Amino acid sequence: MATLLYRLGRFSFRRRRLVALLWLAVLVAFGVGAAKLSGPLGDTLSIPGTESSRAMQVIEAKMGGGGTGDSASAKVVFTASGATKLTDPAQQAAVERAVAALAKAPQVAQVADPFQAKTVAPDARTFVLAITFGALVAAGLPLLTALLGVGVGMLGIQIATGFFDLNDSTSALATMLGLAVGIDYALFVVSRYRHELAAGRESEEAAGRAAGTAGSAVVFAGLTVIIALVSLSVAGIPFLTSMGIAAAGTVAAAVLITLSLLPALLGFAGRRILPRRRRSGIAGHARAAKTPFGERWARLVLRHRVPALVLSLGVALLIAVPAMSLRLSLPDDSTAGPATTQRKAYDQLAAGFGPGSQGPLLIVVETGAGRAQAAAAQVGKTIAGLDDVVAVTQPVVNPAADTAILTVVPASAPADPAGRSEPAHV
């Protein structure tokens, strides 16, 4: 491998114009392909085989989406001040006028009356109104090669959208990983190339040695990342599979560019890759120069390897202690700024309905024709008697009366391990 990469590095350096033209042709070809073959990116995520997915499929098929498919929803929160209550005639009339006005707003498909939907807090001072809407040279070279790799990867993803259904988050993951590995891998080779020049070797030989040594590390590291990303397909979740393969392709492009185009660019840069004071008399300067800090640090660690190992492990364990109580969750309105309307609505809902109002549970009841109303009422009664349940809304039944939807408000917050925030199928 090292010998092959050495030859590739020298060839790319020597025939740099040809290599640069070839990569330019690749970029143009990908650009034309993206313009002619690309399709739309999706914005939905699904996990086949789960109860949540089955529930959503029932909603889409029998409830016309139910406001949860290709639509978006918003919450309008009203809170009564002082001793007044929203159930007072004047307050209720004001709320109903607001409901009527919102129902006439553009792009609004449905508005749920809070008094009919029973989404008024027990103290009659807060409720939720749900609205559903329709439809430098050394530093610059690694950056340049990383951007080229990401560009090839993004264009490749655009081409793939013409043949496969890809989510719009696919390109975000590929961009982040492509930039990260592209810069790192190029820095490996550039650093080694500068070291070889400082040792007095000719530029072409330095490029070959850099590709043969640092390039081997790039291949190993790149293959490791590619295998890890492709392994996301083992989970059997389509959007994770597509994201992993797309990101792996971008990483592969970064590796190929680092091993072939970067040596060509080093040929164009010549000795300008070195600081100005070191562009002449390189070998003599290298002997007179002070040993770099990195080398001195590495020698120190090698001389005291056991204490260094124990100390590093101790520090790593100390840093990892907080992770033992780490809880992960998706961001919600509680993470918004205190002055935003989203945060104010979140605080009002939490105060009026409890923290569980921020993560309601969707229950889908599927029965024979004409029996959904009675079955949903029985399910709602059973669920209302369970622990950690604050409220259960009235069921929404489809025209065929064979499917109904219930919304359950738990007492626990969405991030609380005791609660769940995903649809369920009954």
Image (tube, grey):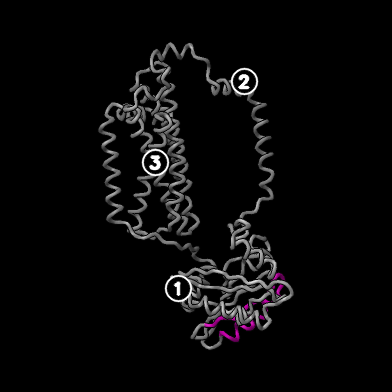
Q: Residue furthest right?
A: 83
Q: Nearer the viewer, residue 25 or 4?
A: 25
Q: Earlier in the sequence, mark 3 or mark 1?
A: 1
- What distance separates the C-alpha of mark 3 from that of mark 2? 40 Å
Amino acid bearing label 2: Arg
Is residue 58 toward the left or the right of residue 253 in the image?
right
- Say if the magenta span includes residue 395: yes
Can you identify the residue that label 1 sits on?
106
Q: Residues within 10 Å of mark 2 (few under 14, many from 20)?
A: few
Q: Quadrant of residue 168?
A: bottom left
Q: Which quadrant is home to the C terminus?
A: bottom right
Q: Nearer the viewer, residue 94 or 389?
A: 94
Question: Which marked residue is nearer to the observer: mark 3 or mark 2?
Answer: 3
Q: Residues within 10 Å of mark 1 (few under 14, many from 20)?
A: few
- Say if the magenta span includes residue 55: no
Q: Residue furthest bottom?
A: 370
Q: Nearer the viewer, residue 356 or 240?
A: 356
Tag 1 near tag 2, CB within 8 Å: no
Can you identify the residue that label 3 sits on?
147
Q: Residue at x 43, y 11 (%)?
A: 284
Is residue 233 toward the left or the right of residue 269 in the image?
right
Q: Earlier in the sequence, mark 3 or mark 2?
A: 3
Is residue 200 toward the left or the right of residue 13 in the image?
right
Amino acid bearing label 1: Pro
Secondary structure of the residue carrying tag 2 is: helix
Can you identify the residue that label 2 sits on?
303
The boundaries of the magenta stretch are 372-397
